[in-house]
Image (cartoon, rainbow, N blue to C red):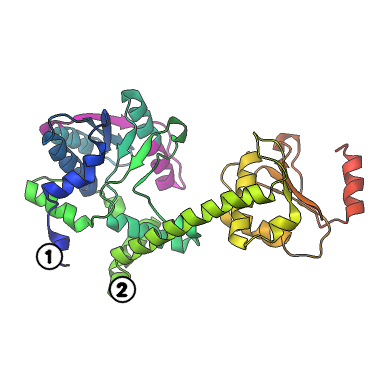
Amino acid sequence: MSAAEAAPVSAAEAKSLFDGFADTPVLLLAVSGGPDSTALLVLAARWRAALKRGPKLLAVTIDHGLRRESAREARAVKRWATGLGVQHRTLRWNGAKPAAGLQEAARAMRYRLLGDAAHAVGARHVLTGHTLDDQAETVVLRMARGSGPTGLGAMARISPLPANRENGILLVRPLLDLPKSRLLATLAAAGMSFADDPSNRDPRFTRARLRALMPLLAKEGLGARRLALLAQRLRRVEATLELTADAAVAAVSEAPWSGQGAIVLDAEKFLHLPAEVALRVLGRAVARVGYEGPVELGKLEALYEELTGGGRVCIRRTLAGALLTLTGVGLTVERAPARSAGPVRRSKALTTRQYDRRRLRKGQ
């Protein structure tokens, strides 16, 4: 570790991290009590104390109720926040916990509770302590899951708060370019303690297993900064592809998209789009009219491969609550019949005559 990576975060650096929010009425800090979020609390409090006027800070701790120590840790965070002149609230995840996908469920509930708290106090920004190390781990995790450019772009510094997008609340990660080592050094210099969550090292969880591999990857040149740079470049690619997809939607659509009505695309123009752009257009159309949530990339790719396979006069498929029909003229994407009324089954490729006969029999 270089000397720079072991140095505490200076007051000048802290100012640069938070100054964009000096005119914000309220900032909500998500503070679990771990080293990263505790450093966020310390740095934000110092920054605010140096201002004559600035936002009110509210630290919020989510007690998931998954460990015996969680309530005690929440009380410790309250003491630290109070000592720094920051108001504090503890919110609890009550009720039954899932046996599978526990970390994902906890994450979703955490963001929901944080969003509710932000909305209640009029905060438009929720700040978290995600670090450069977290960014690198996210890239590796998404590589392991086979993510495309969107997923490999990992975390942005500012993005809509998950589970609260309709409220316009933003998730801010001001420490995303800082390694954890510098936050630990900051806490040591301030004489601040922090909580240790053993689940971060629990091999039952994928992220914990991948975290244990990070030192080995760093020895091969895949350190946190290199992986974060990859994410940054892919976010640049992602922005370009999204603009290209915007133009493609206008070029291949026979009419503007509105509401959840059927979307009709010019089949010839659609099939001549570059594959990545066509996938995005297709995904947007399915997401617009479907009712089963986000479209899985793998399933979208499989559908696209079938649509572009050639040799089939008519293809009719369902995906994520959307019904897609490809003929020689157009690709229609419309809302699929509700499952309670009987789902549209995957059908084999049909000739035009067979397809027309089936439509007449079903009164379509």
Residue at point 43% right, 46% down? 104
Q: Nearer the viewer, residue 348 or 152?
A: 152
Residue pointed to by mark 2 = 221
Q: Position of residue 199 (x, y in %)?
A: 31, 51
Residue pointed to by mark 1 = 3
What residue range appears in magenta? 82-111
Q: Position of residue 19 (x, y in %)?
A: 22, 41
Q: Position of residue 227 (x, y in %)?
A: 35, 64
Residue at point 16% right, 53% down? 184
Could one spot residue 195 in this view of the protein? no
Q: Is residue 115 above or below residue 121?
A: below
Q: Which quarter shows the N terminus? A: bottom left
Q: What is the quadrant of residue 77 in the picture?
A: top left
The amino acid pointed to by label 1 is: Ala
Q: Nearer the viewer, residue 191 or 258?
A: 258
Label 1 neighbourhood size at 10 Å, few (<14), some (14-19), many (20+)? Answer: few
Q: CA distance from mark 1 to mark 2?
A: 19 Å
Q: Is residue 67 above or below residue 268?
A: above
Is residue 343 toward the left or the right of residue 122 in the image?
Answer: right
Q: Is residue 96 magenta?
A: yes
Mark found first going from the N terminus, 1 or 2: 1
Q: Is residue 353 magenta?
A: no
Q: Is residue 190 above or below residue 215?
A: above
Residue sitting farthest toward the bottom: 220
Q: Nearer the viewer, residue 314 or 268?
A: 268
Q: Secondary structure at mark 1?
A: loop
